[in-house]
Image (spheres, grey):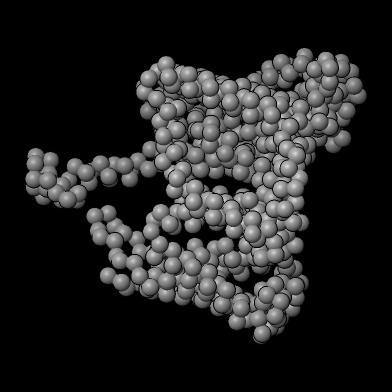
Amino acid sequence: MTSIDLRRMLRWGWMAGAAPVFTAAVGMLEAFDDRPLIYPVLSLGYLMLLWFLPIAGYQASNTPVLEGMEAPPKGLHNAAAGAFAGLMGGAVLSVFTVLVNAFDMRDVFVSFSARMVELLTWGRGVPGGLAVTAGVPAVLGLAGGLMHLMSPSGRRRSILAVEWVVVAALLGQVISQVLRQIRLEAAADLMFTRRALEWWAAVVLAAVVWVLAERTKGGMGRMRERLFAADVGRRTRNSIWLAVLVLVFLIILPQLLGSLLSEVLANVGLFLLMGLGLNIVVGLAGMLDLGYVAFFAVGAYTVGVLTSPISPRFTLEWSWWAALPVAIVMTALAGLLVGTPVIRMRGDYLAIVTLGFGEIVRILFLSDWLSHTFGGAQGVQNIPGIPLGFTTVSGVGPEGVLYFALFFVIISAWISWSLQESRIGRAWTALREDETVAEAMGINIVAAKLNAFIVGAVLAGFAGALFAAKVGSVFPSSFELLVSIIILVVVIVGGMGNIPGVAVGAVVLIGVLGGPNVPGLLQEFAQFKLLIYGALLIFMMLRRPEGLVPSKRRSRELHSHELTQDAWLQKGGAFTGGQDGPGGGRQAES
């Protein structure tokens, strides 16, 4: 069967035009055009404009194969379908370009400028450049359709090569700085021009990835088998050696990255600390907490009030080490204070109550009533750093802050992992799956919920204490509701209930895009990062709700119906090729 679904082609062709139109309409094309990626071939603006077109071309000619059915043969009709989808997307983009050029709509859409029309027509204007505006998407759609004619191995290697080139181009500043830190300035100057990857370097990198992709495919599996060997003694030795290597890498990492990248990773560490705490409350116990930033604020303000020499009321001037235990106790009390009244609440009601608590805490810190203690809108300033005897760790030296962030992340990850595998961790899992059944099985619901709130609050207190020493001042504006939402997005995107997943979510979102008030590696996305957060969250909920690095248990919960269906089909011979035994096809037919 070589026919193509016309409805599918039209749907993906429409999306192939809608995606570039949306990208240009929100201003990404014009804002990112000054950022070259592959010199002098591609800029970040054109990448954001055109990246979806090959995907649309591939999907337009991709025929879903039902289980047990034979896949239709691939041929030039797949390429034609991809080209049609791309051409349709180009036609939509061309119509949009003509409308923007003909009508002045900048009073409503501020991004609809003559510069945008020039970029959409590749500098040729209207109508001379409309052929290019429609032709480039058609070529990219054709490239997506031609992917069907490649072998699975070739397709995988091509995609990996493109991905590596794009990542290397986006992180050109990071790679260049690392090369300079290890005294390879000549290589950095040779490979990168104006923060952009040279075109020949992109070709060489793509070729290297193409060659190594197939060779390393089985290597990762063999390495995993060696690390997790069946022999207990060998597995323990491998774990020790791996831990030593990771520790050595973390020690030399700040020296390789320099101040700028260490600052970014220190911010990642702070959000990872909060993400690990929220992962216990949401990922393990299944309680949606939208006011989690309040615990972060309690930890930061406790350290600030106790250590600042010009605290609004107290002039104790404690050391950071003396204030840290008090901050932990105060955040634990805050967790107990929040958890006690919401014991019997669940779902939306719990989310609303915790959201209210987070706003109450922020407003109290901001209020004139408590300004003598917390400084009101002026906050608590001149907070000293972390004394180490020979030096003081503060935001002036981000490398030292990064070391402390890594130290606290290791402690928090160990606490999370230990509790996850303990009796209370299993109680949290049962509570998440079904609270009524868990209570019927004898689990103390009150104790389990309070323990989750307290442990999560304490981990946020770690982050708050380190944040106060890093920044040197705390203000109520640093603890808005948006911070809680971003932490929740980190947990959801990374993988709820999974510690490595939360780490990946923090690195991808905070490290690359940046947090609410902190920059990421891609500073060009600063004004669009909330838009990207929202789009990524929608995509994850629709296509991969278990997260980027999901836990096995969470994946089983979300895909239980698929696993049940597969098990049923395997038992019924009529659906799996048929077996005439006791559990085979004749039994299914009867």
Q: Left or right: where does residue 217 sit relative to residue 276?
A: left
Q: Residue furthest front?
A: 186
Against 560, is 469 above or below? Answer: above
Q: Residue furthest bottom?
A: 127
> Can you see residue 528?
no
> Can you see residue 537?
yes
Against 373, is 534 above or below? Answer: below
Split into 4 quadrants, where in the image is the N terminus? bottom left
Q: Left or right: where does residue 423 sit relative to residue 458?
A: left
Against 121, is 261 above or below? Answer: above
Q: Left or right: where does residue 81 sit relative to residue 72?
A: right
Q: Nearer the viewer, residue 337 or 106?
A: 106
- Picture residue at 76% right of the left edge, 30% below the top: 399
- Picture residue at 80% right of the left edge, 25% below the top: 393
Give percent across and percent down for residue 39. 69, 61
Against 227, is 530 above or below? Answer: below
Q: Nearer the viewer, residue 172 or 300?
A: 172
Give percent across and percent down for residue 555. 41, 39
Q: How many marks?
A: 0
Give percent across and percent down for residue 143. 49, 68
- Picture residue at 52% right of the left edge, 73% below the top: 139
- Picture residue at 69% right of the left edge, 53% below the top: 191
Q: Quadrant of residue 402?
A: top right
Give percent across and percent down for residue 543. 46, 51
